[in-house]
Amino acid sequence: MTPRIATSFSALLLAATGLAETFVVAPFSNRTNDAKLDWIGESISEAIREAAEASRLGVVLREDREQAVKRLSLRLSSQLSLASIVKLAEATSSERAVYGKFELAPNAARPASKGSLRITARVFDVKKILQVTEVSALGAIEDLPVLEADLAWDLLRALTGREKVARLDLLREHRAVKVNALEYYVRGLMATGKWMQHRYFTQAARLDPKFPHPNFHLGRMQFEDERYREAAGWLEKVPDDLPYSEEAAFMLALSRYEISDYESARKVLEKVEPKLPVPEIWNNLGAALARLNRPEALTYFRRAMEADPADSDYQFNAGYVLWKMRDFANAADRFRAALDRSPDDQDAILLLGKSLASSGPRPGEIRTEGLERLKDSYIEPSKPVESASLAK
């Protein structure tokens, strides 16, 4: 299997369907004259983006923003012109852009501190060509996670026009992150080489074992390298109340399946299925149940097949379970359907022939064992979001 996770594009999908306005968060400009602190600008941006996503606001994914940055040849650590901010918003189909800067000055109140950090965040409405809000935070650089959480809180209240913002547990948890672990994590996000990413994320996880973000990225990297046992070790540390917890659970279940821990894969998929009612989840749950010889496997394969009749794998999996149950007539129908969609499917051709001959499974026949087909990618269904209503 060649793993590939299609991360959620829910914000962009919502923008395209007109269900909510979308905004992009740019890394904050470094005004300290110290390039070693560029990571702080990325950290501020990521804190705001994650808090917005957790509060169900339409926000562009970091990966999509980075693609737009490359196309526009922007250098985000430097001071961006307003024209560049507008171009970034347009390139990501965003109606609004969050951007800003951070500055560092001596901290008279804490002589031992490395400095006092002032962060200023602004929101620009691209349609109205108007800056609609500005918020700021000030404190010791050692308290960066606290400053980011406070800034995100103030910004989200401005974005929603409400005093209370949903999912504030994310902001509370962010305040508790150790600043050195946060630095290594953000440097890992910014790194271009996979080896350097792994090094930074591992260091972040070591410095703060309670910080879940490095665990997620390390698990995804191992999953993509098909190192499933190692992937499961990292992904099982990701709590289920974070914006990316469903993706982590999806990869965790596949990892456990690939190391033949079908019971654990089943438990993970049954837990995540109410949150992700998509055919890929039903299919993989059916595969895990099939390996456990559980009759419910057919129910989930049929559910996937009915949700996406054009997918040949769902047709095949349903036929495969029916064939093993010696329901040859119905199995043959499903294999025909699979071949209608994928005429060169050799396994479907073989099993159709066996079904027509009423020839069922035989012990030790390796050619017909373990043929369940997994789905290793998915796109999360669009989740309801809160509309951002900014006042002047």
Image: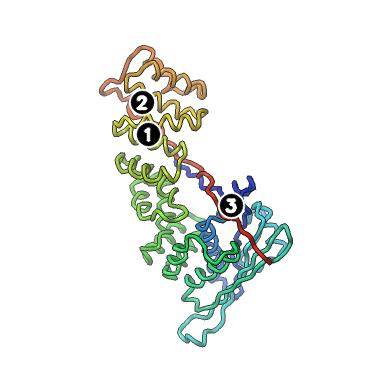
Instruction: Find numbered disc 2 in the image and state the secondary structure of the residue it sits on.
Output: helix
Where residue 173 appears, as percent x and y from the top left, is 43, 65
Where residue 113 appears, as percent x and y from the top left, is 47, 82
Q: In whole angstroms, how far apart are the C-alphas of marks 1 and 3?
A: 33 Å
Where residue 386 appears, as percent x and y from the top left, is 57, 55
Image quadrant containing the N terminus: top left
In the image, is 295 to the left or to the right of 149? left
Q: In whole angstroms, how far apart are the C-alphas of marks 3 and 2?
A: 40 Å
Q: Mark 1 vs mark 3: which is more N-terminal?
A: 3
> Which disc number belongs to residue 286?
1
Decide: few, some or many residues near mark 2? Use Cα within 10 Å; few <14, some 14-19, many ≥20.
Answer: many
Residue picked out by circle 2: 321
Instruction: Find numbered disc 1 in the image and state the secondary structure of the residue it sits on.
Output: helix
Residue 150 position (above or below residue 334): below
Query: Quarter of the image holding residue 325?
Result: top left
Residue 391 position (above or below residue 247): below
